[in-house]
Image: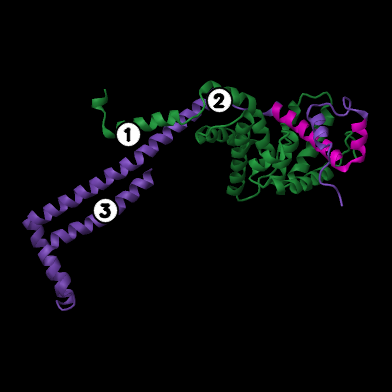
Amino acid sequence: MFHDMTFTDVNRGHALDEASAGFMMDEDTFRAFYERTARGIWGYLARVSGDRQLADDLLQETYYRFLRAAATYESESHRRNSLYRIATNLARDARRRSLTRIPFSLAGNDIERVPSRDHAGAMERMTDFTRAMSQLKPRERAMLWLAYGEGNSYREIADVLGLRPASLKPMLFRARQRLAALLGRTPEEGKR
Amino acid sequence: MNPVECEFESEVLAAALQSRWPDRVDAQLRAHVAGCAVCSDVIVIARAIDDSREEAYACASVPDSARVWWHAQLRARREAAQTAGRPITAAQVMAFACAVGLLGACFGATSTWFQSALGTVTSAVMGLNGKSLLPSATALMAEHGALVLATAAVLFLVPAAVYWALLRD
C-alpha cells in the first residue's frame, strides 16, 4: 500500500520508474536492432582496439550507453552512427586508461574458425592485415574500417569520429595509402 | 602531385563491398583500376577489410540480445536507486549530526558533573596559559562552555558524517 511507504521508498520508486522509461526503445525494437548491428560493432571494436577481450567488454557498455542516451533518431543510419560514435569513444577512453599500449592481438587461434576454402591463404592474408593494421593509429584504423568496411560517407565518418568532414578527406587518403603500402597487394590479390 | 580522390571511387568501393570485384564488373572499370592509384588502393583495402569482417563475424561471440537487454534494465534500475538514495543519505546524516549536537548541548547545559568538569578544565587551561593571554576565550568558555563544545562537536561531526556518507556511495 502507498500509505505504508516511507518518503525514501516513494522517491526510489519514482526513480526506478524513470529508469525503465529512460530507454527510448522497447525490448523488441532493441533486440532487432542489436541482432542487426552487434557483430558489426564487435568487429569494429576488435579492430580499432586490437583486443578481442576488450571488444567483448566494450560491446555491452556500448549498447547500455546507447539505451541510456535516450535520444531520438531520424533514421536507422542515424541510430547506427550514434552507436558507432559511442563505441569509438569507449575504445578511445579504454586506450587512454591503459598505461601501456594495448598489444594488437587479433590474429589468434580464432582464425582457424574462418569458413574458407583456401585456409592457408586466408590465414596468411589475415595475419598480414592484422600486422598492417597494428602499425596504424587507432583513429586511422577506425576511419578505414568505417569507410571501406561499413561503406559510410565522409560526413558520417566525420560525425562518428568527431572530425570536420573537410579534414577527414586528406586524413583518410593518407591512412589508405599507408595501409595499402603495408599490405603490399595488387587489386588482383597477388603480391606486388 | 597524387590525386586524393577519384570519380570512380564509389563505384569501385561498391563493387568490392558487394563482392563483385573482379569477375562481375565492367572491363572498363577493371582497366581504370589497373591504372588508377586511388581506386587500386580502395580495392586492396576494401577486400582486406571484407575478409577481416567475415572473420570477425565468424569469431564474434556476442551475447544474446535478451541478456543484453536484461542486464541494461538491471543496471539502469540499480543506478537510479543509487542516485535517488544519495540525497536521502546525506539528509539523514545531517539530521543525525544535528541531533547529536543538540543532545550534547542539552547535556552540557543540564549536567552538574559536566559543568564542574568543564570548570576544572577551564581553570587548568587558565593556569597553564595565564588569564591575560586568553581573556576572551576563557570568558567565553566559562559562560557558554557547553554551547561552544556542542558547536565544535557539530562542526566536526557534520563534515565527517557527510564525507563518510559520500565515501559509502
Q: Is residue A149 visible?
A: yes
The type of residue carrying mark 2 is Phe
Q: Which chain is indicated by disc 3?
A: B
Quadrant placement of the N terminus of chain A: top left
Q: Which mark is residue B157?
A: 3
Q: Position of residue B27 (x, y in %)?
A: 93, 29
According to the image, label 1 marks what residue? A11
Q: Write down the colour of chain A.
A: green
Q: Amino acid at mark 1?
A: Asn
Q: Is residue A192 visible?
A: no
Q: Chain of mark 2?
A: A
**Residue named by callout 2:** A30
Residues shaded magenta: B28-57
Circle 2 residues within 10 Å: few <14, some 14–19, many ≥20: some
The x, y position of residue A72, in whole percent, is 54, 32
**Tags 3 and 2 on a common chain:** no
**Discs 2, 1 touching: Cβ within 8 Å:** no
The residue marked by circle 1 belongs to what chain? A
Position of B52 relative to A31 (above/below): below
Element marked by disc 3: helix
Residue lying at 30% horizontally and 31% vertically, measured from the top left:
A10
Is A104 in front, or is B85?
Answer: B85
